[in-house]
Every structure is written in C-alpha cells, then in structure tokens.
Amino acid sequence: MRHNWVLGWIESGRTWPKDHSRGTVESRSIAGFGLTRAGKNEIFIWGRRAVCYHATDMKAIFGQKHAIKVLQAGLASGRSHHAFIFYGPKGVGKFTTAAAFARVILCHAAEKNREGVPTACGRCPSCTLLDAPPPKPAKGDDGEDLPAAATAHPDLHIVNKELARYSSDRLIRERKLLTIPYEVLRDHLVEPVYHTSQLRHNKVFIVDEAELITPVGQNVLLKALEEPPAGTYIILVTSNEDRLLPTIRSRCQRVGFGPLTDGDVAAWVDGQKGAATGQRRDWAIAFAQGSLGRAGWALDYDLHQWAQAVVPALDAMVGGECPLELGKTMAKFIDDFAADWVKSHAGASKEAANKQAAALMWSMITQHACQRIGEIARRTDGEDESQQEAVLAPWLRVIDAVGRAEAELAANINLTMVCDHLAITAHDCLSPA
C-alpha cells in the first residue's frame, strides 16, 4: 500500500510524479531530502532545489527527532539562536528541516501547540507567500533565464553555488560550479543581511552546501554571524562541517542530523510509484546507508546496474581474472550519470556532476570492500591474528586505492585515466600473488 508521505528533497534532483494524488504541482525537478507526512501547506523553491514540501508542524519531519527537539526547544523558549549549522550526511533532511524551521520563524502569528511550541499559522502574509509558487524567471536578451527569487517570499533567501550562473560578472558565470564564490555570498547574503525585512518581520538566509564557501567568503561571513541585525537568522546546511572555519562553527548553534534506519528507507522505497522490488530494492536500501538522497539516486539512475557490472568484476579479481574493460565501464557510468544530471538540471555544472557521480561509484566500491572484510573477519574469527590480517589486507588496500582515486579526480586528472588506474590497482591488490 502506498504510504502517504510527502517528500522534500535536498540532494536527489528527482522529479515529482505528474499524476501524484495532490494534483496541484507541475512535474519539475525536486530538491532536497527529508521525509514529512502530508500536510496542507507547501513551500516552493526555484532552482536546483525546485520544490520543497513540508508540513506546517516540524514534528512531521521524518526520522530526525533529536534535531527537531533541539529547534523546538529554542522556539518554545523565545530565545532561539540567530545562526545555525545543520550538519550530517547528505540526503537526510537538513535542507527540508531548514525550510520548515524558516516557515515558523517568518510566520507573523505563530500559534503554540499543546506542547507550547510555536507553529506556523498558515494564514498570515508570510505563510501565504510561502504557499505561493515563485515567479518564473524572465528571459534576457540572449534568451537565457534572468535570476529570479528562489521563493515568492522576499525575506527567505536561498544561497547555493548555482547562483553563480546568474552573476553580473562573466568570469563568475563561467566558473566551474565547485564552490560558492565570495561574490555570490556577498550579493545574496553579506549585503542583503543588513537590508530591512520587506514584510517588517524576520528574515532567514539558508546556505546550502555551506562547506563549498571559499575561505575568503567564510571570513567575510564572520561579521554577519557576529553582529546580525535583529530578526535575522542564518542557517548553514552542510554534509562536511569540518570544512567550515572553527571561527564559523563557534558562532553557530550546531544541530546534528543522523542517518535514517533501514526500516525508514525501506518504507520510503516501497512507497514510491512503481516501487522497486527484489534485488534492486534490497540493494538500493543497503546502498542508501540511511540517506533518502542516496536511495533516490540509486532508483532514479539505476545504480544497481553499476553494481551488477562492477562488483562481480572485483570479486573475479580474487580468482585471478583481469577484467580489461572495468576502468572504461566505470568511467562511462559516471559520465552518463553526469550528462543526465546536467540535462535535467538547468545551470548545473558537468564537472560538479562528474564529481558527484564519481563519489557514488567510489562509495559503492568501498561499501562492497567493507562487506567482504566483514565476511572474512567472521569467517576467520579465532584464527591467528597475523593470518587474519593477511587475508583482510587485499580489500583494505582496495579501500586505500579508492581514496587515491578520489584525490586524483580532485586534482583534475582525466576521469577515464583515474578509473583505469583504480581498476589496475584493485587487480594488483586482489589477485593471488
């Protein structure tokens, strides 16, 4: 039976089904991830994060009870912090929670529930704007989209790396979308943060993938975090908190988000239209590692097909086989994923999409290596320690090789060369001496 969940998607880029029972939303690229129960109100966000669904009550956010409890405690006390870092794995609901939290902060007539926690009223000018689709981008003289507000709400500001595509500076527009440039942060946060709220209430800035802010940008951001105007809230959403400066972290309230349980992921997978079954379903749940974002990628881009080609080739190496085309196969999977991503995400960077796809490939190989290590460890339990280490070493070296492949790609070495090198190294690690 289909579950009555409504999704806010952060990293997956999935498409909302045209025939979804709500029937009021066009099919378009969906952003973000965080599972919420169906509610009356929706918040619409243009760009890579095209639509973010959430219920009025933050308690409806699925699988993040601790994070919600922390935020609700601040709201109930009336002394909520002005700056936050939402940190945790990709695809577990950080951005969705930020949007739901912003809705309450921006509400002009928040109502307390039975627990004394303020919730959005759903009727005030702020809530009305959040429920309205934003204006579609206008076209410039060259036929390209001009920058448009991320939402219809003038006091909810969404900052992400894709805004570089709409910079007035041609050099910024033509950069690879691998960072959030200082210029983007300046134009969409550092300067607007001191502007008066247009609705004469609060204003909220959500920075997605905040770990991508350049060091210069992070240093400039410090002043806004230290002395924000009254009624201003800044939320940094990140899956790699360590890349934020210690001075940034010390000025923010940190709110942690953890992986969802396999049961939660399974419930979501089973609730999808045309739900996956059998091995494809089970593999997607295991690959997700508690992230609905990863589960979404696995289903949308049929990553199970990757596993069917790559995993048997790795296992065959243990028996001495040498799959000559493995490197090219991996590179093609990655390149095809990136091409599809760019095609379905306006303004997306091919380089960034390649790195995203490669990260999924590296993760799949590492997961399989860890699975084999666990099996060997259980099988050799009680044996001599040195003998056990010897049989575990090949797969441990494969994990090291994946780390080197990641570093090589980060150094802009050709993707096919990186994949070929990884395949050759894996063979050297796994094949019998």
Image (cartoon, helix red, strand yellow):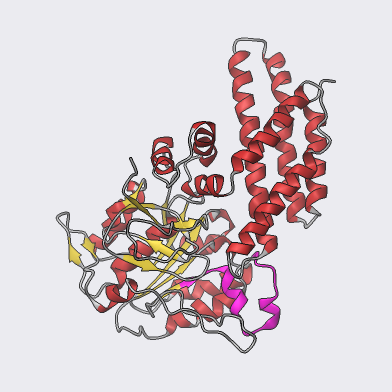
The quarter of the displayed image where residue 354 is located: bottom right
* Vertical side of 242 occupied by 187: above or below: below
Tell me if residue 167 is in the magenta stretch: yes
The picture places residue 179, in percent across and down from the top left corner, at 63, 66
Residue 295 lies left or right of residue 407; in this view the side is: left
Return the residue nearer the eye: 203 or 280. Answer: 280
- In the depicted view, which residue is nearer to us: 185 or 28? 28
> Which quadrant of the figure contains the N terminus?
top left
Residue in front for this viewpoint, 32 or 25: 25
Residue furthest front as drawn: 19
Q: Residue reaching furthest left?
A: 114
Residue situated in front as seen by the camera: 50 or 407? 50
Magenta residues span 158-178
Q: Position of residue 403 (x, y in %)?
A: 71, 43
- Answer with left or right where residue 177 lies relative to residue 296: right
Residue drawn at 38 percent across, 64 percent down: 99
Residue at point 63%, 32% (across, down): 368
Above or below, 119 relative to 316: below
Residue 334: horizontal and vertical position, in percent?
69, 50
Whether residue 132 sits left or right of residue 259 in the image: it is left
Q: Can I make out residue 82 in this image? A: no
Q: Quadrant of residue 143?
A: bottom right
Point 50% across, 33% down: residue: 282
Q: On the rendered image, what quadrant is the C terminus found in?
A: top right
